[in-house]
Each structure stands twice: as structure tokens, then as C-alpha cells.
Image (cartoon, rainbow, N blue to C red):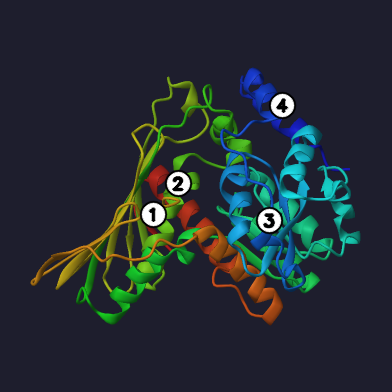
Amino acid sequence: MPMNLTESRRQFLRQAGLGAAAAALAGPAAAATLAQPLSAAMQHDDKKKLGWAIVGLGKFATEQIMPNFKDCQHSKLVALVSGSPDKAKKLAREYGIEEKNLYNYQNFDTIRDNPAVDIVYIILPNALHAEYTVRAAQAGKHVLCEKPMATSEEDCQKMIDASKKAGKKLMIAYRCQYEPFNLNAIERIKKGELGKLKVITADHGRPVKPTEDKADTWRVVKKLAGGGSLMDIGIYSLNATRYLTGEEPVEITAQEHSDKSDPRFKEVEDTIVFTLRFPSGVLATCTSSYSYQEVKRGRAFGDKGWLDLDPLSDYNKHTMKIGTEEGKQEPQLKEGNQFAAEVDHMSECVMQNKTPRTPGEEGQRDVRYIMAIYEAAKKGKAVKV
């Protein structure tokens, strides 16, 4: 029987000298803003909505994902999976979820017997994505998995193979590819509004605080996170260069710096700078860091103009600025619900038997490039991909 997730977290964190944080992580969490009760709109015409189970009730799940089901047209929240029974029961009451649809990590496989659950959303530490995706597929469920897809390319392949064997959909949660400002930027670049694309810059950083925020405790433990800032937030920069160019990189260089006297960076990297060369000649320079103040921005340069997304990957309040020979402009786009759009896209793909916009293969490519970035930083020379 698989190790209980809470126990595994405790074990990993104790080994890292963070036992107190582990105890806090396992306790009944209290998100500052818990979700509102199930709305009438969410209950309306539920028969046309697919049932979703959330696996992992951390801060991101409870504060971002669960509340946004109210705006979904094709998806409804019907089940929860957690190592904390009290927390699961409390959230179930708030969202109108039947207690029989609450699971823990030991009886998770019995979800196969629940016809109300069509899709499972894996929101766990990175190193656990593969195990629970495979188990969900074997239980006959479609899977949406958080990014990064896994901590190795081999695990990504196991996830893809398990889903294909089960005849189920696998999608990776690249929410920015369902966000209106990013989609608009892709379209403008494709139409040639910036001319021939030349350079992309993308920066993502935030201070990680494992002793202050229990949501960060696992992020500095390599066995759970797989890596540091690159895996967690640098992947936004990496993925953005790929969807803005519409190409795959052919060469990667990188440099990394971490203060090993800082207990946060005993196991994972702090700051990493990497460059990507694309077949068309586009060059991308990206950064990620766990030690500077929050930034989530990207800029594309063409020979006829530039385009800014700042923020590029926030939950809301996006802005776009464009500069050309005609001057500067700031398009006023409608802010959309990227979470509801992402979840509904998965439901529509299941309903219509379509391949998701961001399938397992998309996640596997990013993990492959992440490993190449680490290799380039370690070797101090360019790596062909």
C-alpha cells in the first residue's frame, strides 16, 4: 500500500531538518480566504457537467482552483482527496460535496468505483505527480496534472503511457495558455504585428519562505520538488518562449547561483539564468529566482515592434503594452477566468474526445528542457536539444 502523503511529506521534511514545518503542513490548514458555498449557477444544469475530484488541498487548490468552479460551464466539483480528514470535511460542507466522495491517499484507488468522478486534478508536490496520475488512470479517470508534469522525463513517459493504456485523457495545467492576454499575444505575434520575431525575455521570481509559509515547505526539499526556482516558476518563462515563438529550442545555455549558507538552498537552486536558441534564429533569455521580489513578466521583440506582458503569469490584473513606429498602445482586453477556462477545456476534450491544448507531451518537453538547463549550468557550456 502506498505511503500516506502526509506521512511521506513529514518524512522528507524531517530529513531536511524541517520537522516543525512538516507538522504544520499536515495540520488542518486554514486558507486565509476559503471558497464560497456552491452557487446556484454552479448547480444549474449539472447533468451536462463532468465531475471533478481535487487531489491535494493545499493553498493553491483551496484559494484558486476550487473557488473558480463556480464559473465553469462544463465542470463541477464532486470529490476531494486529502490526508487531513477534518479539512476535507470542512471544505466538503462549504462546496456541497457528499461525505461519501471524500478520499485519503490510502484508499484513493477506490475512486474507480465512483461514477460521479470523471476527471481527477492532481495538485500535489512535483515528485508525487507521476504516482497519482498513474493511479488515477488505472482507476479509469481522466487526469489534469499541475506543472511541472514530473521530476524526470522518464516519469512523464510513465504518465503518458498509463493514460494511453487506460484510454484516458492527460492534460498538464499550463493555465497561461488559457489566459486571454497570453492568447492575444500569441495571435499578434503570429499575425506579424511585431514583424520578424528576434528576441524574447522572460523573468519569474519570488521570495520562498519555508519557515513562514507552510505552502513553501516542500519547495526547498529536492525529493519533493525535484529542483528549485526553475521547476517552480522558471517553467513559466520556459513555456512562454515556446508558445510565443511556436517553436522548440535547439540549443540551451545556463548559469546558476545559490548561496549554500542559506538553509533554503541546501538542496535546491535559487537563481538560474538560461538562454534558448530557436530554429528561426529567435533568442530567448530567461531568469528565475527564489530570493528577489515577485516578478512575472515577459517581452517579445520584433524588427517592427515590441510587446510586453507584465504580469505574464499572474492570477489576474494582466496588462499588455505594445510599441511600434506608430507609438505605444495598451490594448484593453477583458480579464478572463483562466482557471475556469482551463478546467472547462479539459471537460470539453473529454466530452468531444479531443486532444487537450496542453497534453502530456507538452509537459514532457518542458521537463526535458529543464533537465538540459540544469546540465548546461553544471557543465558550463551549451547543450543541444
Where residue 190 sits, quadrant-wise, is bottom left
Question: What's the amino acid at mark 2?
Answer: Ile
In 3D space, how far apart are the residues under numbered discs 3 and 4 (Cα atoms)? 22 Å
Quadrant holding the C terminus? bottom left
- Classify mark 4: residues with Cα within 10 Å, few (<14), some (14-19) or many (20+): some
Up/down of 130 relative to 241, above or below: above
**Residue labelled with disc 1:** 237
Report if the CB atoms under discs 2 and 1 are less than 8 Å apart.
yes
| Mark 3 or mark 4, earlier in chain | 4
- Secondary structure at badge 1 equals helix
Point out which mark residue 27 bears. 4
For the residues labelled 1 and 4, say whether their Cβ atoms are less than 8 Å apart: no
Q: Is residue 208 left or right of residue 139?
A: left
Q: Is residue 46 left or right of residue 138?
A: left
Please name whichever residue, 42 or 338, is drawn nearer the observer in this view of the structure.
Answer: 42
In percent of width and height, residue 346 lies at 63, 69
